[in-house]
Amino acid sequence: MGIRILQGLLPLKPREALKDALAGLTLASMNVPQVLGYTRIAGTPVVTGLYTVLLPLVGFALFGSSRHLVVAADSATAAIFSSALSRMAPVASGKYMALVGMLTLLTAALLLLARIFKLGFLADFLSRTALVGFLTGVGVQVGVAMLPDMLGVGVDSHRTLGQLWDVLRGLPNLHPFDFALSAFVVAAILFGRRFAPHFPISMVLVVGMIAASAFFDFAGRGVAVIGPVPGGLPSLRWPDVSWSETLALLPVAASCFVMIIAQSAATSRVYALRHGERVDENADILGLAAANAGAALTGAFVVNGSPTQTAMADNAGARSQFAQLVFAALVVVVLLALTGPLQYLPHCVLAGVVFTIAVGMVDVKGLMAIQRESASEFHLALFTAAAVPCIGVEPGILLAIALSLVGHVRHSYRPHIAMLAPNAEGRWEPRDAQPGVQTAPGLIVYRFGADLFYANADRFADEARELIAKAPSPVRHFVIDAAALTDIDFSAARTFRDLLGELREKQIEVVLGRVSANLRADLEQHALVEALGAEKIFSTLHQALAAVGVDGESSVGPMA
């Protein structure tokens, strides 16, 4: 396994470095409030948000290949592990933080294994449709979880629906000052995001609220504040977790792993394409492993390639990982000198910042785009979005993967079935295969739109039988357009051989056209070349038609 380092950083010219440094400064001013907010989702102390943009940024800059991907705290992965770990230990407790550290280390190990064995393709099993639905569901869940702090009401439930019910019951007792502060923060951030996207509105609000809280003594007026935040750099430590607890964390780490490689790969591809660059996905996986190992050993939590933070960096003018290194250097300054004022930050303000992050995760445009193009996939996305707040984040991502796989299998099981049939001008063109229609008297040209495997082979054979049985005139030639067939497994080969035997008894000649080299190899492996006859297998459809006495050049339309 060859390892190349600094791919996302070099080459770096002095003029570009200055631009990236300014972009890193802008990114820090916009992003520090967000990483603090992510700790509310993760259930960890506020300072751990700053830790996620320290060693993890350096780790990815060293080993990753993407010049644009920002690896830091992310709401999706934070929601995944917090929902599971909160049932194992009290949130933000020493035990909880040890579990978070081991989970992050396990996630790093899974990413390293994925790099070694090149398992990044596993992310492809989480379809974009399911991912949009999943992230929308996480947005709803996170938004609901922030309502108690925003309104100053108490909740007892850890489930989204239960929390929503507790909030509704507590509305008569809401804290007016908390509600006013959080409403102002949410409105200001959403307004700024819409009309001044490059202005660090979150940072201005957080700094302003800290100053106001200290000056007017918000804590004395009944507003909950964060309290003392430890300063200084994080210390390196190994999570103190038992073997049985480590095993219990593996499924949660696997869920984080899938989300990380799916979301990070999609984000890095988008920005590499936008800037005409190439990205080494294996190197990025190694960079993500290094970033999560750094997070685990410094008391932070799982980090991910964040689409929102990457977009902010790109808009700020970042063109290499040097911008992220500058960001990390500024965080060092904050940790060494500026954590004291954070104690005055009201919980309701931080919850308001997180609520706006949750609003951004509800991808209405993405859902509408899916709805316009595919009603069935839109329903899948909605179902996934509803599942997350109803059954939880971890089961939600497993369901999203399962639904993605079911959608793929369903498409392969029920592919598009077509046949050549004459149009008004007498030319043959593809159309949906329907019993009672044939290509020409005595001839059917049939196309099955997927590979043949054990699940769809009987469907293939049954539809062929039905087309032949209900043809307007006796069929003598059955030509299979094999353009979509690249593979045939053992079970499908047996079914195909049985079909050939039946048609041979009925004196129906079967001919294959547009047979690829891979398909021919499968046909030979399963002895189908012998059963069919080598002289009846052709690389083009015109050759196959000519073999049954049809002038393909004059009869077949251009789409065939």
Image (cartoon, rainbow, N blue to C red):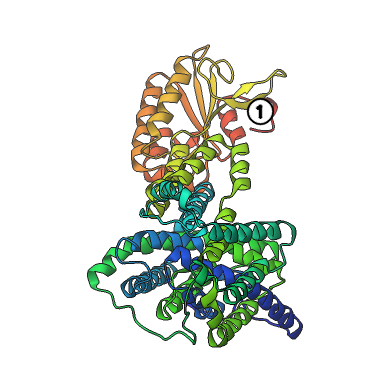
Residue type of the residue flagged with mark 1: Val
- Tell me: 80 left or right of 201: left
The crowding category of the residue bearing disc 1, from other C-alpha atoms within 10 Å (few below 14, some 14 to 19, many at least 20), is many
Residue 86 horizontal side relative to residue 60, left or right: left
Q: Does the image show residue 424?
A: yes
Q: Residue at x 56, y 78 (%)?
A: 61
Depth check: 459 or 261 in front?
261
Q: Which residue is mark 1?
A: 556
Residue at (54%, 72%) from the top-left corner?
345
| 6 displayed left or right of 470 | right
Q: Is residue 228 above or below residue 352?
A: below
Q: Quadrant of the C terminus?
A: top right
Q: Is the N terminus in the top left, top right, bottom left or bottom right quadrant?
A: bottom left
Residue 75: % across, % down: 50, 61
Residue lying furthest top: 472
Nearest the eye: 506 or 269: 269
Tell me where residue 504 appears, x and y as whole percent.
40, 24
Secondary element at image label 1: loop
Q: Residue furthest front?
A: 221
Residue occupying the point 34% across, 63% down:
85
Which percent across, then down, holds residue 244?
Answer: 23, 68
Q: Is residue 280 visible?
A: no
